Image (spheres, grey):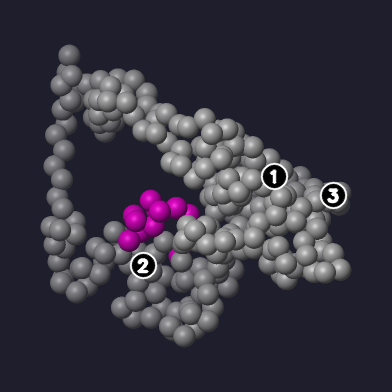
Amino acid sequence: MCIRDRPGTELTGVIPALPFLEAMALEAEVPVGKSVVVIGGGNAAVDSARTARRMGADVTIVYRRERRDMPAIAEEVEAAEHEGAKLAYLVTPQRIIGDAEGKVRGIEVVRTRPGEFDESGRRRPVPTGEIMRIDCDTVILAVGERVDPDFANASGLRVDEEDGTLEVDRYSLETSRNLFYAGGDLITGASNVSNALGIGKKAARTIDRRLMDRLTPSVLPEFIYQMEPPDPPAGGGRNTPAELPADERVRSYAEVSVGFTPQVALDEAHRCLRCDIRSVES
C-alpha cells in the first residue's frame, strides 16, 4: 500500500514534495516545523530535504531500500549529507502519528531487509516486523507521484494501472489518443530534466515525420564525425566545479556550485571526449 493511503496523511504537517518545492520557488510562506521527515529516495526527496535544512529544520530522509538503490543523483545525496540531513535506510513508513489536535507528532516505520531481486534489478525490501518511531512535526511525501487520473480521463488518455504512467507507443511516443504525444515523467515515472528533454526530442522527430513525411534539418541535423583524434588530444579526468562550504550554503539559497576558474574551464574544454575512435596511428 502506498504511503499516501496509510493512516495519518490527512494530519496537519503532512506536505507533498512537489507543491512544497513549488511554493518555495515562488517564495511563498510554507509552514515547516523544527523536525522534518522526508519519505522517498528520489531527487524530489533530496531537494525537499536540502530545502528544509535551509529553513533551519532538523531533517531525516527515510528510504525503504539500500543507499545504492536510491534513484536520486548520488552527488545530490552526498550534498544533502554534507548539509546535515540524516538518512535512514531499509525502513518503510507504516503510519503518521498525530496528536489530539490533528497535528503531526511522529512517524512509525518498520525495518526491512534486502530480499530477492525484482523486475527493477534491485532487491525487494522485506519487512522484518521491527517497529520504530521517529519523532517529528512535519512529514514531506516525496513518493508515489502519479498522473492525475481526472486529467487523463478527461483527455481520453489511458493510464497504466500498475505504475500510474501514461500508456504510449514505445517507438513513436504517441498516446492512446490519436495525434497526442507524451514524454517526461508522465511516461517514465520520476526522472530528471535531461531524460525529459531527450524524450521530447524523440517525440519531435516522430511528429515531424508524421506531419511533413520527412525530417527537417532543424529538428534532426546531420552530424559528420571524422575518425581522427583531436590534435593534440588532452587527457585527464573530469573537472569538478568548486562549491560553497556546506555550513555556508545551508544558511541561504545561494547557488551551491561556483563554477570553474578560467584555467580549469580551459582544461575541461581541451579534454578529449572522442571515445568512439577505435584506432590511432602513431
Q: Secondary structure at mark 3?
A: strand
Q: CA distance from mark 1 to mark 3?
A: 18 Å
* Res 278 seen here: no
Depth check, mark 3 against mark 2: the one in front is: 3
Q: Earlier in the sequence, mark 1 or mark 3?
A: 1
Question: Which residue position holds label 1?
Answer: 58
Image: 29 above or below 224: below
Image: 145 above or below 242: below
Question: Which residue position holds label 3?
Answer: 132
Q: CA distance from mark 2 to mark 1?
A: 42 Å
Image: 146 above or below 282: below
Q: Secondary structure at mark 2?
A: loop
* Res 34 seen here: yes
* Foreground pick, 111 / 133: 133
Q: Residue 232 location, x and y as percent?
A: 18, 19
Span of residues in magenta: 187-200
Q: CA distance from mark 3 to mark 2?
A: 44 Å
Query: Label 1 crowding class (10 Å Cα cut-off): few <14, some 14-19, many 20+?
Result: some
Q: Residue 279 location, x and y as percent?
A: 22, 24
